[in-house]
Image: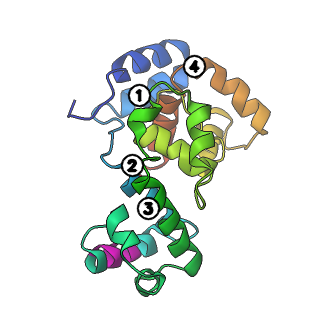
């Protein structure tokens, strides 16, 4: 396994496979890949703000323009730019403001994941959603992809909802309470289960 894989991945796969035949089949089908941690907290959250409500392709193009204009999308470069400059890269006025807010927080030392090491997932989610433009789904993606928390179940994620319907319920989407009940058997490895359900829809991993 390459650098960046969580230490718990193999144990999680073994336990999920033992508890759940569907998981065993999925895990067996995608053996060479797993979740990879990412580098920079500001970057990760800025990308998620840029990507909201637009296609992946449109988001990539805005991000490329930001990178070309700012040199590097960092809290320093965002704070040094005017709203007009950010808008000229294809951001809406509102998203430009959100990025400015995020940058101020980062500069003030309030986006330092080392401070969150002892926090539980819900406490981190509560902190992240106080940032304008960051909702629960983005906070959950951050916990999974950046902090590599093992037990995140992002029940607002369309891919997860589809993956459960497809693999467990013959394509039928059941109510949220049923999904929560099903996910009991994935504890404490819901992030890993989610990742494999995404793979069943889209074999190439998306990384946030």
Task: Check if mark 1's residue and mark 4's residue have beta carbons within 8 Å.
Answer: no
Residue identified by numbered label 2: 41
**70 falls in the magenta region:** no
- Secondary element under disc 1, as helix, strand or loop, is helix
Q: Which residue is mark 4?
A: 187
Was residue 66 drawn as part of the magenta stretch in this picture? yes
- The residue carrying mark 3 is 103
Label 2 vs label 3, nearer the camera: 3
- Residue at x-position 55% and y-position 65%: 52
**Left or right: 28 as drawn, with respect to 68:** right
Q: Quadrant of residue 42?
A: bottom left
Quadrant containing the N terminus in the rendered view: top left
Q: Element at badge 4?
A: loop
**In terms of sequence position, does the residue under pointer 1 or pointer 4 come before the other?**
1
Real-space Cα separation, disc 1 to disc 3, in angstroms: 39 Å
Identify the element where label 2 is drawn.
helix
Give me the C-alpha separation between circle 1 and circle 2: 29 Å
| Image depth: mark 2 or mark 4 in front | 2
**Of marks 1 and 3, the one in the foreground:** 3
Q: Main secondary structure of the magenta part?
A: helix
Image-quadrant location for residue 146 = top left
Disc 3 element: helix
Mark found first going from the N terminus, 2 or 4: 2
- Neighbor class of circle 4 (other Cα within 10 Å; few <14, some 14-19, many 20+) is some
Q: Pointer 1: what residue?
A: 27
Mark 3 against mark 4, which lies toward the viewer?
Answer: 3
Q: Which mark is residue 117?
A: none
Bin the neighbour count of mark 3 within 10 Å (Cα to Cα): few under 14, some 14-19, many 20 and up: many
At which x and y percent is residue 133? 59, 61
Boundaries of the magenta span: 61-67
Asked whether residue 147 appears in the rendered view, the answer is no
Identify the mark nearer the N-term, 2 or 3: 2
């Amino acid at each position: 396994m390459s650098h960046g894989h969580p230490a718990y991945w193999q144990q999680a796969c073994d336990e999920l496979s033992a508890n759940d035949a569907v998981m065993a089949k999925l895990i067996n089908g995608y053996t060479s890949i797993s979740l990879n941690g990412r580098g920079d907290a500001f970057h990760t959250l800025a990308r998620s703000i840029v990507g909201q409500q637009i296609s992946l392709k449109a988001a990539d193009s805005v991000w490329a323009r930001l990178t070309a204009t700012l040199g590097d999308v960092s809290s320093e470069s965002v704070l040094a730019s005017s709203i007009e400059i950010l808008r000229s890269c294809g951001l809406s006025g509102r998203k430009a403001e959100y990025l400015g807010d995020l940058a101020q927080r980062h500069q003030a030392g309030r986006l330092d994941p080392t401070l969150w090491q002892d926090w539980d997932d819900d406490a981190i989610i509560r902190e992240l959603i106080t940032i304008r433009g960051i909702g629960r789904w983005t906070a959950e993606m951050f916990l999974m992809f950046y902090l590599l928390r093992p037990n995140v179940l992002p029940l607002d994620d369309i891919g997860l909802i589809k993956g459960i319907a497809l693999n467990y319920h013959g394509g039928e989407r059941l109510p949220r309470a049923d999904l929560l009940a099903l996910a009991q058997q994935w504890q404490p490895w819901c992030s890993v289960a989610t990742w494999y359900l995404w793979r069943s829809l889209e074999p190439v991993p998306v990384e946030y």
